[in-house]
Image: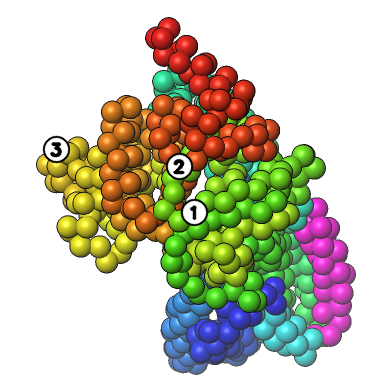
Amino acid sequence: MFRMYPYIKKYQKDIVFSLLFLLLESLAEMAYPNLMAKIVGWGIASGDTFYIAQIGLVMVGIAMLALISGIGNARYSARTGVGVASDLRQVLFDKVQTFSFENIDAFSVGSLTTRLTNDITQLQNAIMAGMRILVRGPILLCFSLVMAIRINLELSLILVVVIPVLVIALTMIIYLAVPLFRQMQRNLDDLNSNVQENLTNVRVVKSFVREAFEIEKFESANHHLLDSSIKAMNIVILNMPLLMFMMNAAIVAVVYFGGNMVLSGMTDVAQMTAFINYIFIVLMSLMMLSLMFIMLARSSASYKRVCEVLDMNVDLVDRQEAESIEVVNGEVAFEQVAFRYAGSSAEYILKDIDFTVNAGEVIAIIGSTGAGKSSLVQLLPRLYDVAEGKILLDGRDITKYTLASLRKNIGMVLQKNTLFSGTIRENLKWGHTDATETEIISAAKVAQAHDFISSFPEGYDTYLEQGGSNLSGGQKQRLCIARAILKKPAVLILDDSTSAVDTVTERKIRNGLTEVLQQTTIFIIAQRISSVRDVNKILVLSEGKIVASGTHDELMKNSLEYQEIYYSQNQKAEEA
């Protein structure tokens, strides 16, 4: 757990205070057996009630000291545990924010959610319990063991049998339980992924009447979690019965052999009472430590899962020579670019991509599903890195820009329209945090969103649910376009971003874009040729390669693939 040290170091003062209170509490507990022996050996034997009252008052005072010390220890250990968990959760979230798409693909969203919540909570509980038990247990064990040996060495030999048996049993339990705890967390990942997927796509589930299927899928994931949990608990539950058995056996042995010693005059009742109390503390300490080790075994699985995220090598980072540079023109060039997903044995998604786009031009990319259109435009802001070749922006390799400056100058409207919980105004200002009201309204008008926004009672202050679930698909698309326009980027990428709006609205949006963003280079991924036939250049993609490029008229003369798409769409339109 040495990886936790940088996070724990911040709470050194809390740890020191916690340990001081813990030491006071432990010393107070160590005093009880001796005081009880004095009451039995002298007070009761002599019938001195005043002496008994005096010792009783001392015990009450010590109990109050133990109470205050226990509260202090619990307070400072809680501050440490909760603080470390909060810091670790923040570091983990910050690390996830640096992940590329490739890194995120390595974890499911449900798994990352579990690691940020449940796994961190397991570590928090382990730290809090560790400062309370893992330190307290050895202190009580050592003190009480020394006192027991001082009182009666021969009876203390009983522990020579008990302790090794407990240690061996605990080691076996932990050895068997740790893999099961890891499986538990993996099954919890699957369950969280299932819940998130279902709730995110609940409208699709209902529209296809798939509730029964989703219930069955959840039931399966829930059953797997239950099964792995029961397997882990079946191992762990052996700990307590075994401890209680060994503890009771040790007490019986002490009473039996100690009783004979008292009868034979080798010791007296007072010493025997103190010895039994100390032995009881020894055994209770062992019990506490065994429970703590079980908790550590559980948290070790969570610890490794957290470290997997922290240790993930982020494959998209600023290169050493990268600079923060403002894009001036927005000229784009792909030079013999090839791309494949990391770790994939499949063929290249893109191959031999070579074209140039002048500043301010509008370029359309069309092709069949799976041709690589989205993959191509995602390479430009370095959401993925090229496998071969290079991409130039304003004549400079995009790896020479810092990621922040590169993406600051590129606006994207992805296929999936993502909005966040908050007002419409807050969502639009993602594109430009300091945008004025005039700029916001202007961008909304270009995106043909102002009218429907104004129809809401709260207007731009209308609250959007998570993902913009209280809007239609077309409304979400237009807000995402307005957000990108507000950014005023040098390069704008529209990835099939008008699929949910009618052709008239789409034409108005296109006209507005060319008027407002005259100097912006625009990439449009489109399904309908009719919506992009007047652009500067059209690229036709097929199986990851550019098979044709040119204007609409040029492609109608020279490209068989383009003609097939065009006539296919016209035929469908006529049939409709």
Q: Residue at x 44, y 62 (%)?
A: 329
Residue 367 lies, with reference to residue 564, above or below; the image says below
Q: Residue at x 63, y 76 (%)?
A: 321
Q: Outermost residue, top direction? A: 575
Do tag 1 and tag 2 residues touch (Cβ < 8 Å)? yes
Q: Which residues are the magenta region?
A: 152-177
Inter-mark Cα distance, 3 to 1: 40 Å
Amino acid at circle 3: Ser
Inter-mark Cα distance, 1 to 2: 10 Å
Q: Residue at x 86, y 69 (%)?
A: 164
Residue 468 in percent (x, y) is at: 33, 42
Q: Secondary structure at mark 1?
A: loop
Q: Secondary structure at mark 3?
A: helix
Whichever of labels 1 and 2 marks the residue nearer the N terminus, that label is 1
Q: Residue at x 58, y 34 (%)?
A: 540
Residue 514 in percent (x, y) is at: 33, 46
Of circles 2 and 3, the one toward us is 2
